[in-house]
Image (tube, grey):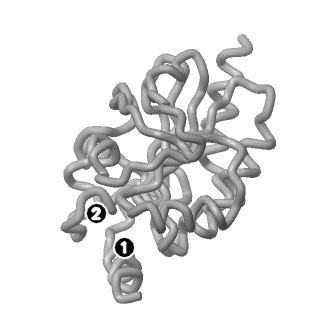
Amino acid sequence: MLRRLLLVAAIALVPRIAMAEVGASIVVTPEMGAVHPGVPAPDFELVDQSGRTVRLSSLRGSVVLLAFVTSWCPFSQAEQPNLKKVSADYRGKNLKVLAVDVKEDDAGYRRYLKRVKMPFPVLHDATGAATLTFTPEHALPYFTDRAKVLVTANLVIDKKGVVRFFTVVDTVNFDDELIYARKMIDQLLAEDAK
């Protein structure tokens, strides 16, 4: 409980950097460091809830919505049914949805999976190593555990593997319905259709 309160308090102190661009959450900018929109997404390989190994680069050729989640974060909990809805709404289109459970033990990972049955891979990053490859050095500097910077962060990656949208959670302007991620997904799918 204390961990949750500290997380919410730390996030509330974050300056509203680049929010006007998106209108919700905190947009990751080049000033925050790599990774940010316009650069290739780091590759990783993790195991999903079915025991299958998933490599991010194997999804090239599709637009990818990548969500970093945990069982204990109230923002991850609020967003979880909306991730499932995005998956359903874009079924049959060139979108792959992935969630990465950040730095939780097996019990925490199972709690996340049990809450809402997800029709897409939920990958377990027990050590946080894959998550750290995405964490911008200067985003949310108040967090000493740098993997937790990305809890409830969302990225949209284009079919070439380039990050096109990246937000970290903002407690004031939280977009649990993924409205702005959907706008980028729609834009990328429309570009593909041309």
Q: Which residue is mark 2?
A: 140
Q: Which quarter of the rendering shows the C terminus?
A: top right
Q: Are marks 1 and 2 in contact (CB under 8 Å)?
A: yes
Tell me what residue is drawn at x 49 percent, y 45 percent. 123
| Res 116 → quadrant | bottom right
Marks 1 and 2, how far apart at CA: 7 Å
Residue reaching furthest to the front: 51
Tell me what residue is drawn at x 54 percent, y 69 percent. 75
Amino acid on which the number 2 mark rests in the picture: Leu
Question: Residue 1, percent across and down?
Answer: 41, 88
| Res 188 → quadrant | top right
In the image, residue 14 sits, relative to residue 122, either above or below, namely: below
Q: Earlier in the sequence, mark 1 or mark 2?
A: 1
In the image, residue 66 sits, relative to residue 59, either above or below, namely: below
As drawn, the label of residue 125 is none
Label 1, residues with CA under 10 Å away: few <14, some 14-19, many ≥20: many
Question: Residue 26, percent across and down?
Answer: 43, 58
Label 2, residues with CA under 10 Å away: few <14, some 14-19, many ≥20: many
The local secondary structure at tag 1 comes to helix
Q: Which residue is mark 1?
A: 11
In the image, residue 138 sits, relative to residue 186, either above or below, namely: below
Q: How many marks?
A: 2
Question: Residue 120, percent across and down?
Answer: 65, 41
The local secondary structure at tag 2 comes to loop
Amino acid on which the number 1 mark rests in the picture: Ile
| Res 62 → quadrant | top right
40 displayed left or right of 108 = left
Residue reaching furthest to the top: 194
Tell me what residue is drawn at x 77 percent, y 36 percent. 90
Tell me what residue is drawn at x 65 percent, y 18 percent. 191
